[in-house]
Image (spheres, rainbow, N blue to C red):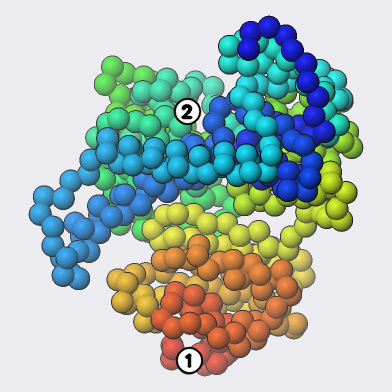
Amino acid sequence: MAGTYARSTPVLVIGGGPGGYVAAIRAGQLGLKVLLVEKDELGGECLNRGCIPSKALIHASLLYEALRTEGPEVGVRATEVQFDLPQTMRWKDSVVAKEREGVASLLKSAGVVVLKGEARFTGPHSVDFTAPDGGHERIDFEHAIIATGAVPAVLRGFESDGTTVITAWDLLRMTSLPKSILVLGGGVSGCELGEFLARVGVDVTIVELLPQLLPGIEPDLSRELTGSLERLGVKVRVGTKALALERRPKGVALKVEGANGPEVLEAERLFVTIGKRPASRELALEEAGIVSDPKSGFIGVDDQLRTNVPHIYAVGDVARPPMLAHKAYREGTVAAEAIAGRTTRFQFEAMPAVVFTTPELATVGLTREAAEKLGHTVREVRFPFAALGRAHAAHATGGWGKILGDTVSGLLLGVHVAGEASGEFIAEAALAIEMGATVRDVSLTIHPHPTFSEALQEAALLWLGEPMHVARRRTDAVGR
């Protein structure tokens, strides 16, 4: 489309990731004309370079390991089991492509017009759109939704070269496995993809600056994961600062300093995953009068996702943490409904989160420390998966479910689970907290047997001092 053109739209959505495409679909459902601009592929980082492709690789590695280690014990024997990375990558790509086609179909069915290219604000009601061929177009809008997501944070001196020093985006399209890799950053991406690599035979070391893996998560969950990774052969170095990087012909040398002083770690590759920053710098926000945090880059919004410019909204990772796709889904929906004049707002008592490691980690609500800071008198208990029939049948007895409740009101405050399929039933706990349920309410909810979700009911019974499938002890009534 070389040349300069102009058009107008009632609603402009900038970014086609989870927040953007859901906002566009919902606005279309509500009868609004929508134009969506996406510079890369529909689905954003989550679908193309994050959530979906990483889970596909994780699934393949779990299948590979299960055949080699668990299979013989349960009577499934396979000879010469091999991990074929190129085929796994082709399968992963097919999964992503199918999901992307689904998003495109949904947008089309909602009447959304999609343009591939980049948009930068030129005023409070206009953007300059640049197409891949260099052509420009002025787009005027009545309302706009910014949904540009986030990009990997860059640490000076540790920039990716795509081969020896890599980001998650590079890792998800690599064509060969290194013999060894250093993972700089023990967050979700570092732990999930580090574990994937370890399962398929790579020597993995995770280096994390803070005192625990998955900083910010419930400490018991972090400890459970650390033990699991170490049993897998992963070397975990928490409380360790990366000082300098030397790029060598056949790998890297990372100078670090931890509790034992400075040392040098060597590997074939370095995977840098130190977090993300909002993709807001490239939008020329100042031209529209939009205010963002000068340090973090997050765009300030109200409970309807409006920025300081009332007809311009921001959703998802670009707006505020936590950077979660399911949060972006809801924010996109609220923004679209607000534009359509619906009575709506973004609010929540409980935001669930899942880490797809082994054990799978799922969390929602308050930790003990946070609850006590709010003035709650807290009791917490842990129910072991080893007491679940389904866990034994599925060869997955490791892990536990923890419940926190207020001893005065009986309110359920938080649920933290480490174990098989925990991400599949954490939404039940989120609903209970949102609805103001008590621990007693959870204990009285009939759960199907045999399932992993029974861990919630059993933990609630244990909290009440009425355990059914673990032996009662005198200490059970006080939850210690």
Front-most of residues 109 and 98: 109
Residue 251 placement (x, y as % from top left):
30, 24
Front-most of residues 147 and 423: 147
Q: Residue at x 37, y 35 (%)?
A: 182
Front-most of residues 342 and 429: 342
* Left or right, 209 with reference to 17: left
Please identify the residue farthest to the left as the structure is shown. Answer: 79
Quadrant for residue 144, please give it.
Answer: top right
Tag 2 residue: 243
Residue 292 placement (x, y as % from top left):
79, 31
- At label 1, the amino acid type is Met
Where disc 1 sits, the SS reads: loop
Please identify the residue farthest to the top as the structure is shown. Answer: 3
* Residue 295 visible to the viewer: yes
Tag 1 residue: 468
- At label 2, the amino acid type is Leu
Front-most of residues 168 and 77: 77
Nearer-N-terminus badge (1/2): 2
Q: Which mark's residue is nearer the viewer, 1 or 2? A: 1
Image quadrant holding the N terminus, namely: top right
Residue 173 placement (x, y as % from top left):
38, 32
Judge whether 356 appears above or below 415 on screen.
above
The answer to whether the residues at label 1 and label 2 have Cβ atoms under 8 Å apart is no
Image quadrant holding the C terminus, namely: bottom right
Q: Residue at x 48, y 36 (%)?
A: 49
* Left or right, 444 with reference to 257: right
